[in-house]
Image (spheres, helix red, strand yellow):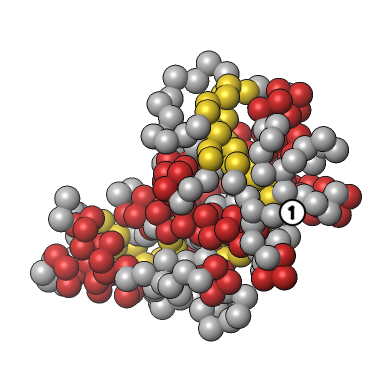
């Protein structure tokens, strides 16, 4: 049974807009769920805009009536609001057959027990709930999509320890650990490819009740730095500082224990870049999300070149 009608929560943000645009361009009928009182401009092409109370299962149930799938792109600060949305999708009268939660980022199935997992605990609970609901109602399936860093978005915010304008770089340990990253439009393509599989032959669907790890690229910090230096014309005049990931995590964990959640970027950096972290997906594995979805990797130098021209 094909998936045609898709409700998107959080569809006006940095990732939500590319996802909605890709869904519309791929022929899906998109209903945008917006917070009551929101003045955000919806992306072009949406079929309907429905204001909702994200704390009310009743409000959400009415809004997603007749929908085949729900895609949540709700931000980290309101990630708990996915719980009523899952409850609405799992209700006996709901027609929703696929739920894609707002997992976009690192793989939260791996983070419990780690300091960064404390901050991401809300995401973990949502997938746990989806697993529970899908067992109780087999017609409701789910797919988690992990993409690591938001590469194009992160470049504008010096998320990778590299500042081309100031010619500075902060490298964790040796700088040789591959890390997971994806451009926003690539993540949108993964969402569409997931829903296309979900709406196809069930025997060919490898996305149902699965957690997929995708990546536009799997570079190291050193490879990224070398590419930036090449594109900017020289490696001269750069200040490169190496930091010990264990020490960074120790200090960040102490602050987190005191209630300081601002250490998320430090903990995320350790998760991604620390020597031996092993958190990048294996591109040769048959379960690599790109392989499952039929999406080839991209060239990070092309994204870098486009950003550095601005």
Vertical side of 166 occupied by 64: above or below: above
Residue 141 horizontal side relative to residue 238, left or right? right
Residue 132 horizontal side relative to residue 111, left or right? right
Q: Position of residue 27 (x, y in %)?
A: 48, 48
Residue 261 horizontal side relative to residue 96, left or right? left
Depth order, front residue of 117/101 = 101
Vertical side of 155 occupied by 59: above or below: above
Depth order, front residue of 252/39 = 39
Q: Dot 1, how many residues are within 10 Å of its Cα: few (below 14), some (14-19), or many (20+)? A: many
Q: Secondary structure at mark 1?
A: strand
Quarter of image, res 70: top right
Residue at 47% over, 34% down: 46
Residue at 51% over, 79% down: 283
Vertical side of 106 occupied by 4: above or below: above
Is residue 292 visible in the rendered structure shown here? Answer: yes
Quarter of image, res 230: bottom left
Residue at 39% over, 34% down: 44
Task: Give the residue pinned by disc 1.
Answer: 141
């Amino acid at each position: 049974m094909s998936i045609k009608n898709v409700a998107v929560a959080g569809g006006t943000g940095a990732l939500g807009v590319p996802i909605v645009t890709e869904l519309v361009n791929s022929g899906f009928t998109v209903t945008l769920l917006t917070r009551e009182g929101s003045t955000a401009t919806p992306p072009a092409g949406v079929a309907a805009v429905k204001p909702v109370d994200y704390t009310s299962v009743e409000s959400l149930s009415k809004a997603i009536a007749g929908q085949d799938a729900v895609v949540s792109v709700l931000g980290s600060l309101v990630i708990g609001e996915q719980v009523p949305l899952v409850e609405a999708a799992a209700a006996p009268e709901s027609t929703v057959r696929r739920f894609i939660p707002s997992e976009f980022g690192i793989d939260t199935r791996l983070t419990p027990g780690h300091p960064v997992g404390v901050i991401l605990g809300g995401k973990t609970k949502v997938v746990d709930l989806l697993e529970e609901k899908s067992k109780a109602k087999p017609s409701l399936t789910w797919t988690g999509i992990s993409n690591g860093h938001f590469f194009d978005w992160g470049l504008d915010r010096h998320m990778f320890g590299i500042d081309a304008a100031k010619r500075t770089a902060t490298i964790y340990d040796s700088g040789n650990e591959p890390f997971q990253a994806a451009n926003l439009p690539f993540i949108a393509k993964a969402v569409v490819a997931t829903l296309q599989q979900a709406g196809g032959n069930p025997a060919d669907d490898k996305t149902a009740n699965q957690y997929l790890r995708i990546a536009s690229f799997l570079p190291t910090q050193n490879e990224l730095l070398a590419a930036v230096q090449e594109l900017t014309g020289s490696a001269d005049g750069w200040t490169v500082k190496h930091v010990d990931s264990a020490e960074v995590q120790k200090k960040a964990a102490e602050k987190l224990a005191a209630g300081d959640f601002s250490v998320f970027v430090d903990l995320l950096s350790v998760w991604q870049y620390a020597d031996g972290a092993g958190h990048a997906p294996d591109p040769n594995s048959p379960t690599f999300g790109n392989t499952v979805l039929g999406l080839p990797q991209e060239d990070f130098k092309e994204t870098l070149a486009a950003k550095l021209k601005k």
